Amino acid sequence: MQIVGTILKIGLLLAVVAVALFFPAASSPENVSTEIAPVAEPVSILSVLLGLQFIVAVYDGWYTSIYFAGEDKNPGRNIPRSLFQSAIAVMVIYLLVNWSLIDALDFDVLRTSELPMAAVIGQVAGGWGSTFVALLATLMALVTLNGCIMSTPRVLYGLAEDGLFLKSVLTVNRGGTPTYALLLGTCFSIPLIFTGGYVFAFRLMGAMTLFAASLYILSYFALRIRKPEMVRPYRAKGHPVLPAIVLLINLALLSSFIVTELISGAIMAAMIAVCIPVGTHLQKQRRMTGEAKA
C-alpha cells in the first residue's frame, strides 16, 4: 500500500507540473481572480526563516527507511542506497513543483494565493481545480500518515531493545507489527487532531524534526569521542565539517521557530520535558541491570 500510494502521489504531482508548464495559468489580468487579494507581507529575515521551517517539514521523511533496517535482509547496502535515492527524489519533485508554479503564475498571484496549485489546475479543469488539489492533499496526507504509522512504533521498539523504553512495546503480533508500540504512538498523536490547525501541527512536526536531528548529530560526535574503536560500516563523508554545518543550520532554524512561535515552542518544550525523567529512570535501570550481570 505504501509503495502504490507513493507512486500514485508522485505521478499526480508530476501531472500538476506538466499542466503548469504546458498550460500557463493566471499569467494575464483576465485570468486573475477579481476578488481583492490579501496584501502580501514584505520579505524579511523572519519570513525567510518561517519559510525554511515549512521547507524542512516538507523534506522530512526522506530518511524513514532507517527505521526498517532491522527488517531488511541487507541493510548495509539497501539503507544507504534508499537514503540517497529518497533525498534526490524529494529534492527533484520539490524543485519541479515550485519551478512550474513560478513559471505558470504571476509572482503577485503566487504570493497571495493560498492554493496556487488550484489556480493552475483551474485553467484546465475549471472549477474542479480546488477539488483536485483537495483530493491530492488528502492522498498525500494518507500516504504520509501510513508511513508514520509504520515507522513510529519501530522507533519505540528500538528504544525498548536498548532498555530505554517500556519492555511491553517489544510485543509483536503475527504480522510483525509492534502492537503496543503502535497503540502508544496512536494515543500520543490523537491529541494533535484537536489543536484545530493543520499548519500548527505541521510546523510543530518540523520543529520536533529539527530537535531530533540536532540530537542525532550531537550523538554522532559523542560516539566519535567516547567510542573511537567502534565498528563503523557507514562512512561519514566530509567529517567533521559537513555534520557541524548541518548542526548549526538545524539549531538556527530551531531557535527561529521558538522565537516566532512562543506558544508552540512551549508545547514542544513540554513534550520534551516529559521524556527526560522517563529516559533518566530507564537509563538508571539499565545501568543497575548491567552492574548486576557483571
Image (cartoon, helix red, strand yellow):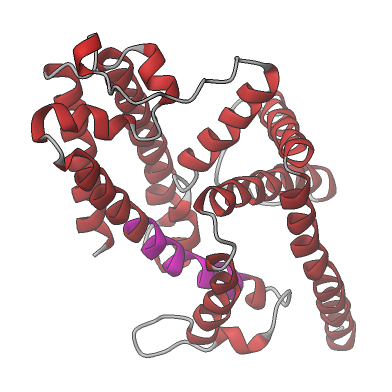
Query: Most extreme residue toward the top, as rendered?
Result: 28
Would residue 95 be found to the left or right of residue 15 on screen? right
Residue lying at 23% horizontally and 56% vertically, measured from the top left: 5
In the rendered image, is residue 229 in sight?
no
Image label count: 0
Question: Considering only vertical position in the picture, is 99 above or below 72?
Answer: above
What is the magenta range?
143-158
Residue lying at 57% horizontally and 65% vertically, measured from the top left: 192
Would residue 83 be found to the left or right of residue 130 on screen? right
Chief secondary structure of the magenta portion: helix
In the image shown, does 221 or 157 lie closer to the viewer? Answer: 157
Question: Considering only vertical position in the picture, is 209 above or below 16?
Answer: below
Position in image of residue 214 (x %, y %): 72, 43
Question: Considering only vertical position in the picture, is 230 above or below 154?
Answer: above
In the image shown, does 287 or 106 lie closer to the viewer? Answer: 106
In the rendered image, is residue 220 in sight?
yes
Q: Is residue 154 magenta?
A: yes
Position in image of residue 228 (x %, y %): 78, 45
Q: Quadrant where the N terminus lies? A: bottom left
In the image shown, does 136 or 253 lie closer to the viewer? Answer: 136
Residue lying at 55% horizontally and 60% vertically, measured from the top left: 196
In the image shown, does 156 or 158 lie closer to the viewer? Answer: 156
Position in image of residue 97 (x %, y %): 31, 27
Q: Is residue 202 magenta?
A: no
